[in-house]
Image (cartoon, rainbow, N blue to C red):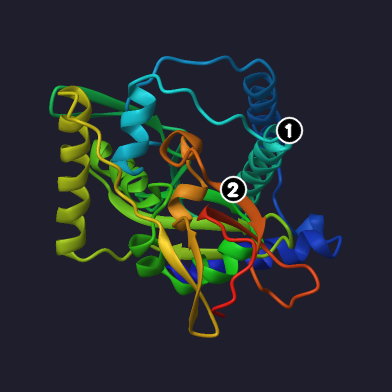
Amino acid sequence: MAFNELETRLKMTLGSLSNYESDSVNVTDAMIDEAVEAFRDSLKKQFTRTAEPFRLRMSNIGRPLCQLQKESAGVEKNRKDYSFVMKMLIGDAVEAAMGVVIKASGVNLTGSKTKVKLKVGETNVHGEDDIEIDNKVWDIKSSSRWAFDNKWKHGFNAIYDGDTFGYVAQLYGYAKAQDKEVGGWIVVNKETGEILVVEATPTKAQLKQVQENIEFTERAISTNLPFKRQFQDEEETFYKKTTGNRTLPITCTYCDFLKDCWPDAVLKKQALSKAVNPKNIWYSVYVETNDNV
């Protein structure tokens, strides 16, 4: 099934459900029960979670190596905002509901929730995929509005080029472990309810690079390769003039070890912004005033 046909079918199914035409959609009790059980597991996991020993998993094998090295070394993580657990639960609920929609849409479902193991070097990397359609592996993702509009809508290469969360390696690992092709991602904007089907269209060179990155990450972790921060702060400009401030790269702002790598970093309203509500920026160097701008 072509990815655009899949998206059309999913949108038609949601359109029928949105307009009280449930009699035209085959949503079974079994589908609902499965989604309820998945969300029950999510509630239990999120509300009883304790720190777990580090291990390489499909969900982290594509993340920046410096983050994995910090976690492997047992470095203390930043304390998460109180809202974190609710954001995780909202994402899990959205993904569970989307699973029902996919099944009810009548696509050729060839598998789901398959537990997989991929041998990388001396390490067995485990994971569980979301869904398989026409024997291709697909991942269901919930997304913020910003990521939906600025990354997912721009297709595979936008994800590949700025893969902060390792989504490409994760999908590749699920497929490789089962000797199947990658399909892509079914993405739900958790703020608006919009959906996108993003086909994974890697070139041979990109697939080779993903495989090499996974292998290097495994070697680096298993051999305790010396830590090296992979990202550098950047000079801030305003109307093409420097402000004297330096900002953190976007990948670092999502990292659990931001404060360990950047102990002097501060979160401030964007310097010199004229907006009514300036956005928050992570600064490695922040100058309160700058007469040179």
Q: CA distance from mark 1 to mark 2?
A: 19 Å
Q: Which mark is residue 266?
A: 2
Give the quadrant of residue 144.
Answer: bottom right
Q: Residues within 10 Å of mark 2 (few under 14, many from 20)?
A: some
Q: Which mark is residue 82?
A: 1
Is 99 on the left-hand or right-hand side of 269?
A: left
- Direction right: furthest residue: 20
In the image, what residue occupies the spot 29% across and 39% down? 65
Residue 46 x %, y %: 65, 24
Residue 115 can be seen in this image: no
Do the residues bearing badges 1 and 2 touch, measured as CB atoms within 8 Å?
no
Residue 97 can be seen in this image: yes
Q: Please tell me whether mark 2 sits on a helix, a strand or a loop.
A: strand
Nearer to me, 48 or 110: 48
Q: Residues within 10 Å of mark 1 (few under 14, many from 20)?
A: few
Nearer to me, 163 or 186: 163
Q: Quadrant of the C terminus?
A: bottom right
Where 53 falls versus 136 (above or below)?
above
In the image, what residue occupies the spot 80% across and 55% down? 22
Is 46 on the left-hand or right-hand side of 226?
A: right
Q: Which mark is residue 162?
A: none
Q: Please tell me whether mark 1 sits on a helix, a strand or a loop.
A: loop
Where 87 falls versus 293 (above or below)?
above
Q: Earlier in the sequence, mark 1 or mark 2?
A: 1
Q: Quadrant of the N terminus?
A: bottom left
Is 195 on the left-hand or right-hand side of 234?
A: right
Residue 261 x %, y %: 41, 38
Residue 283 x %, y %: 54, 55
